Image (tube, helix red, strand yellow):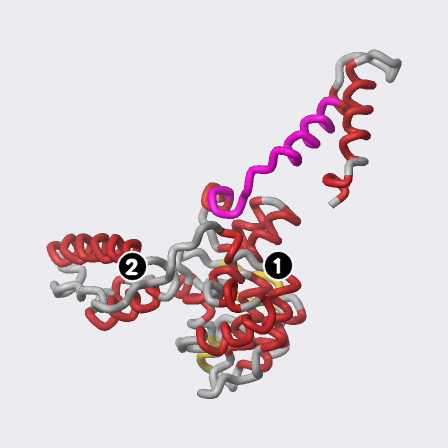
Amino acid sequence: ISRIEGLTTPGCEDFFRDRLREVTRATVRRDRGVVARFVKWAATRSLVNAFEVPQLPPKAKGKKRLRGRDETEVTRAEMIAICEALPRRSRRGHPVKQLATLVSEVGTRLETAQKLSVPEHWQPGSDTLRISRDIDKEGKERSYWLPPRAQRALEDAARGDGLIFGKFSYYKTFRAAARRVVGETRAKHLSLRDFRHAAVAAVKAEEGLEAGAWVAGHVTTETTGRRYVTPKERASRRALMTLAARDAKTVGDRPGTDRAHASSSLDAELLTPECAS
């Protein structure tokens, strides 16, 4: 639910159903409480018509809680292989392959990708994708360059003016392809949210938090840092050694000086097999 117009009984049911495919039932139950309180507040101010927020489906268990992020982390090579394994269209004619390719390349939110349309956000032949405020979760308007694979995916998915993808369930087709690449255990937990996470994390690692935040559509880099940065002791050690070698106050590289010690320690560190990887 990205806009207040979506606060209706059917809108809430769709939101809860989608969330149950991605998180645990306990999480969605907390989400429901937040939505119910907001609806009550908005109704008192005549922003929405008062209605009873629907309960969760009684038999829906939600996504199984994982032991850790390792089970849903996916590499770029795996994402490409999964996209290649997907059929051009699902049995119901949905462009799952093209949607997965776009998310894996530029980290677009699923709910945003579903609202992309021609010519408002992209035009055939263009290498630029425009995200307008009305389709972005954070209401952040931005544009970014489309890598060739993402551009080809849009070319293949678009059928004239109007919605490029629209809303549909991709899980069955997506996970069938994923099983052939990463196996049953990991495939049953994978979703396009994991593709988005991997894509944004790759941009962040390559160009820093600012670039990652722009692609992710985060209003501040604080959110990007909290979700996409993993503290690494060895990386911090190398960085501190580099700074020490560069900024040592002792003049010269004579044996025994601070600069020589830092430089030799850094050289030894960088020659270890762990650092080489």
Range of residues picked out in magenta = 225-244
From the image, which quarter does the N terminus lie in?
A: bottom left
Q: Is residue 205 on the magenta stretch?
A: no
Q: Quadrant of residue 3?
A: bottom left
Q: Residue at x 22, y 65 (%)?
A: 56
Residue 40 horizontal/vertical position (percent): 14, 55
From this view, report whether residue 131 is shown above or below residue 243. Answer: below
Q: Residue at x 21, y 54 (%)?
A: 33
Residue 200 horizontal/vertical position (percent): 56, 55
From the image, which quarter does the C terminus lie in?
A: top right
Q: Is residue 239 on the magenta stretch?
A: yes
Label 2 vs 1, first from the N-terminus: 2
The kind of secondary structure the magenta stretch mainly shows is helix
User: What SS does tag 2 mark?
Assistant: helix
* Closer-to-camera residue (132/275): 275
**Amino acid at circle 2:** Arg
The residue tagged 2 is 25
Query: Disc 2 versus disc 1: distance between alpha carbons?
Result: 28 Å
**Amino acid at circle 1:** Thr
From this view, report whether residue 224 is shown above or below residue 189. Answer: above
Could you classify mark 1 by the number of other residues whose Cα lies within 10 Å: few (under 14), some (14-19), or many (20 or more)? some
From this view, report whether residue 257 is shown above or below residue 189. Answer: above
The residue tagged 1 is 75
* Closer-to-camera residue (121/205): 205
Residue 191 horizontal/vertical position (percent): 47, 65
For the image shown, how many numbered marks are present on the structure?
Answer: 2
Residue 4 horizontal/vertical position (percent): 26, 62
State the mark number for residue 40. none
